[in-house]
Amino acid sequence: MNVLIIEDENAAARRLEKLLKEIAPEMTIIQQLDSIEASVLWLAQNPPPDLIFLDIHLADGSSFDIFDHVQVQCPIIFTTAYDEYALQAFKVNAVDYLLKPIKSGELARALEKYQKVFKTEKQDYSALLESLRQEGKPKYLERMLIRFGQSLKLVDLNDAAYFYTKDKITFVLTRSEGKRYPIDHPLDKLESLLDSRKFFRINRQFIVNVEAISEMFPYSKSRVKVQLNPPTDLETIVSTERSADFKKWLVGETP
């Protein structure tokens, strides 16, 4: 913990340093300055210390003048033989205001106050915030375990070209293999499970992956005819009531 002392009386500076070593030996006094000019120059050229002990009356004027020349970004304990500057002191990062000669007990209480206010260990809420962010995100189905004959098939939904119904059975068709597999979920249920940025229900029979769309053609009544890859013999025309939302979805807008 680095401490800067700004004091123009050598005897007062030595007494303060002695008391600090007794009360808080973990502190390191990195510099002692005795004027406004030297203090402004040092503060402008060095990283801010953890704490400053600042005498109000310096050889070349009032130490409050320092704040007119440089931004002081650390807490301050003021030291002075006079008490009429207390209100002014607490306007500029003051932790405490000690009257000279500084007493050991008063200095200890000032340091305790500094520790409580400025050095209290901040709680790490990053894990909680990340958890809350994740809770706010929709949970999408990423894989699907399908019973296929006497075996089980794991389908990554990034590989799903489209889902469709035929003869009251729902199928998924894969992009890599071009194979279809029967699944248990109806399309109404799948709509809530799939990532809406990738999948769109174009009509009552089809939910398509945007990456499975190979071509599109204007169709009657402002509808769109979609050509899919792998191809299908079934009609893949975006229904009238879904056409406007489909066009927004294609360009990444929220329908």
Image (cartoon, helix red, strand yellow):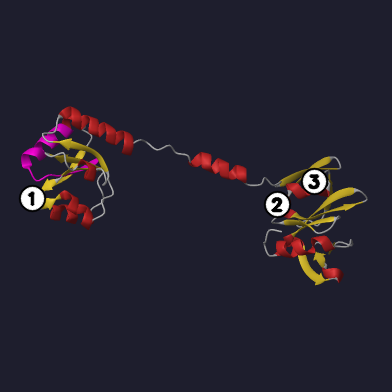
Element type where label 1 sits in the image: loop
Q: Mark 1 = which residue?
A: 59
Q: Mark 2 = which residue?
A: 195
Could you tell me if the residues under marks 2 and 1 are in contact, i.e. CB atoms within 8 Å? Answer: no
Hey, which residue is sitting farthest right in the picture?
A: 167
Which badge, 2 or 1, is on the more N-terminal residue?
A: 1
Between 171 and 51, the one lying in front of the other is: 51
**Amino acid, disc 3:** Lys
Between label 2 and label 1, give the one nearer the viewer: 1
- Is 244 magenta? The answer is no
Q: Which disc, if any, is residue 189?
A: 3
Q: Is there any visible trace of residue 134 in the rendered image? A: yes
The x and y percentages for residue 36 are 14, 53
Hey, which residue is sitting farthest top in the picture?
A: 105
Mark 3 surroundings within 10 Å by alpha-carbon count, few (fewer than 14), some (14 through 19), many (20 or more) = few
Alpha carbons under labels 3 and 2: distance apart = 13 Å
